[in-house]
Image (spheres, rainbow, N blue to C red):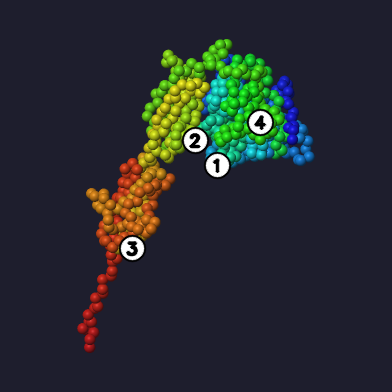
Amino acid sequence: MAAHFGRRLRKGAATTAVAAAAVAALSASQAPGATIDDPAGRAAPDAASAPEESADGPGATGNSPYYTDLPPLNSPNPSPSAGTDPLTPGASEAGIPATVLDAYKKAEAALRESKPGCNLPWQLLAAIGKVESGQARGGRVDAEGTTLSPIIGPQLDGNGFALIRDTDNGVYDGNSAYDNAVGPMQFIPSTWAWAGRDGNGDGRKDPNNIYDAALAAGHYLCRFGWDLSDRADLEKAILSYNQSTDYLNTVLSWLEYYRKGTHEIPDGTGALPGDRSDDHTTRPTPAASTPPSPSGTTPSAPGTSPKPSPSPDKPGGGSGTGSEPPASSPGTPSAPPSTQPPTTPPSSRPPTPTDTVDHLENAGTGKLTAMAGDAFTERIRARAETDEGKAVAKVRIRFTVLGDTDTTFTGGESVATVVTDSAGVAVAPALRAGEKTGDVTVRATVVGRVVPGLDYRATVTERTADTVVRTGDEALTCTPGGEFAHRVEVRATRGGAPAGKVAATAMLITSADDPAVNDEGPYFEDGDGKAVRTLSGLETDADGLLTLPQLYADDTTGTFLLRVTTAGGATLTVELTVAAAETESPGTSASPDPATDS
């Protein structure tokens, strides 16, 4: 079905009134007004400084252009009936294509399970999806959620946009000279490389699939432990997606609108936005651009859609027909590319800070050691320098946790991107140790420039206890061949606090001076009922408690010792007594009283 075009809000007084009303209704506090210079040295008046712990440079989208249409002033409630004119103001705007809406709701449900503290509302995904791609261009997706043609943003070549040189060899965007934002949620390839998710269970992570893209956007917005029910965290998360206060306010307007009500409409019938953030930006013709794509075909001008072949973990080409026109997101360049990528920045543009980086240096990071489950107290610091050793500010440094480990940065992510400060230093978010012990490598690299990475080694040690005691004081006794009436329960602590998940061993020993395993006396039983006198692989629970299995006694009587040892060296020795049951002494019959005899 042909897509219905929604009412396009015109620039001028109408849009100003709508914006003012929307922001007033939201009582939206403006984000910080500090400006960020673009790569060409121009100040972006609506750019806001990203929060320190999430300074992701150009954000998820590379700060690509976005749709600026605002929601109608009238409330979307009540939801239109089947007979409502879809072009009625509010009705078409409130409607979200069925597959797209389903993807948003499934992403919310998944994040509710994996990151319940984030409180991600699906309406936020809908608001961002509206602003980034008009809900996948009105819901033009196939049954699996893949766009009928890839949605590719303009190449980020520094001409009116950010400068982000190619990071994916053109695999996602068909451009091996510069990066482009890709898909209905407009991820740049370098961000998709770590944020990408498989939202529809097909074994691939495809930025052109709305299920994959929506789940990835949810994880992106929920990193750093943000709680999106908190206004400050919500604004930080949105600004991390695109660092613009205008973008923030536009997304917040749609979020509030969708929260008031929405409804499902058929795929392909969604209202298409009309106004873009770059509508009045004149872009110079790029000096050079995309070489042939890896598939051997030459993609069209940046801003149009290549058709990569689907493969596992690579973007799919959708299921559209060959007549399907390529889709573009805001900001298509005005001229096609030449055949060769530039090898140096155009002479008309001064080198960016990234262009001047020669190497990375450790900026004073000390020893990185933490016990399993704990946060590392030391944070990783990297310094970007020129070949003369001078600091380079405003450079994106990517920190990546490598290898098979469950150690992550705060928020559960294995990758974090931070912008260097005025001293050229980028400080990674705090690391949190997982349960896997051993060495972990964290690598720092410069985003957008090929220089050797800088590796940091972190060590995760096993959980330990410094004290272990019995929780009861009853005597542990048993008759020969019987079983002990009470099971041994101990509590492990560290620094006075419960030591949970600490490894422990229980052993019946010969004597206090001879810790060898005793070959007689009390014993445990294995799964086959055979006697065992050493138990390893034990672990305390979250409260530091450990209850040992049932103890039995053979026919040997005496006093025996049970020793419990925890990781960290804490020990406890418990006495066990095996003795025959006490029997009552036979009674002595009394002699008859002779006085009673007669």
**First in residue order: circle 2 vs circle 4:** 4
**Front of the two marks 2 and 4:** 4
Q: Which residue is mark 1?
A: 113
Whether the residues at callouts 3 and 4 have beta carbons within 8 Å, the answer is no
Could you tell me if residue 425 is visible in this image? no
Seen as rendered, the residue at the extreme bottom is: 598
**First in residue order: circle 1 vs circle 4:** 1
Image coordinates for residue 120, horizontal then vertical, percent = 58, 36
Label 3, label 2: how far apart the Cα atoms are: 51 Å
**Residue 150: quadrant of the picture:** top right
Q: Which residue is mark 4?
A: 149
Task: Determine whether 53 is above or below 264 in the image.
Answer: above
| Disc 3 packing (10 Å; few <14; some 14–19; many ≥20) | some
- Assign the N terminus to one quadrant of the image: top right
Q: Which residue is mark 3?
A: 482
| Disc 4 packing (10 Å; few <14; some 14–19; many ≥20) | many
Task: Determine whether 276 is above or below 564 in the image.
Answer: above
Q: Amino acid at mark 2?
A: Gly
Q: Which residue is mark 2?
A: 412
**Residue at (30% x, 53% y) in the render:** 508
**Residue at (48% x, 33% y) in the render:** 414
Seen as rendered, the residue at the extreme front is: 296
Q: Amino acid at mark 3?
A: Gly
